[in-house]
Amino acid sequence: DAKTTQPTSMDCAEGRAANLPCNHSTISGNEYVYWYRQIHSQGPQYIIHGLKNNETNEMASLIITEDRKSSTLILPHATLRDTAVYYCIAVLSGTYKYIFGTGTRLKVLA
Amino acid sequence: DGGITQSPKYLFRKEGQNVTLSCEQNLNHDAMYWYRQDPGQGLRLIYYSQIVNDFQKGDIAEGYSVSREKKESFPLTVTSAQKNPTAFYLCASTATARSQTDTQYFGPGTRLTVL
């Protein structure tokens, strides 16, 4: 499974877009990129996932580079409630295997 | 409301005692998972079950046991053989175990403290 690397922490001003990068340079063609977030002492919450194309839902957008070696999660208008640890995970299609790293701690500032 | 419930939210036990953590889902999901999370760390897989009456060890199964007698329930027992059981335990489920892309949904977690 591909390993992902993320910055340890980031700050973002409330109301601004939060752009969280993830590097997955060894990802294979059938590995999906998943994003979750975890607010302190709660279970991880699914945000979005994608394979090749950019994806958008009500929570966020996912931009995957053409070579699939990196991706960016975009929270378009960050609020204080978006303060959390964000995990980027590469998941092999058809398997259960989620390998969680330590994620990016995003702090949204008032 | 469909979802995953874990109980209790906080659990304390004395050293040397076994303790069982509950995980129930009403999503009609086939597969269920148990993870452990230590402070400042990511999640590590303990056990998983793809169907009733079947389960597999994950990366850190030593000192833990599970059962899957019903589709909606996947209890985890932390035995006295687990050397460092104090942690945050998370249960998750997916609709099927082998679909093309299957999102895992997590419960709220149980924080276990060994005194």
Image (cartoon, coloured by chain):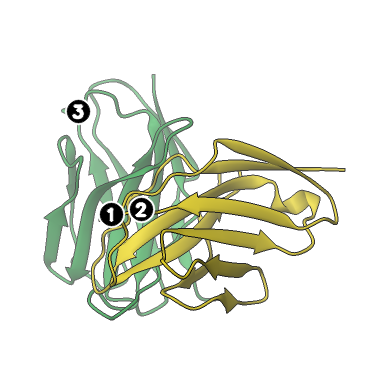
Residue position marked by numbered label 1 in the rendering:
B75
The amino acid sitting under disc 1 is: Pro
User: Is the residue B43 above or below the residue A27 in the image?
Assistant: above
Observer-nearest residue: B76 or B58?
B58
Subunit ID for the residue under disc 1: B
Give the chain ID for the yellow colour.
Answer: A
> Are discs 1 and 3 both within one chain?
yes
Residue position marked by numbered label 2 in the rendering:
B22
CB under 8 Å between discs 2 and 1: yes
Subunit ID for the residue under disc 3: B
Observer-nearest residue: B101 or B18?
B101
The amino acid sitting under disc 2 is: Ser
Q: Is residue B115 left or right of residue A106?
A: left
Residue A25 percent across, percent down from the top left: 37, 53
As measured in the structure, the alpha-carbon distance from the residue carrying label 1 to the one carrying label 3 is: 16 Å
Give the chain ID for the green colour.
Answer: B
User: Is the residue A51 above or below the residue B21 in the image?
Assistant: below
Subunit ID for the residue under disc 2: B
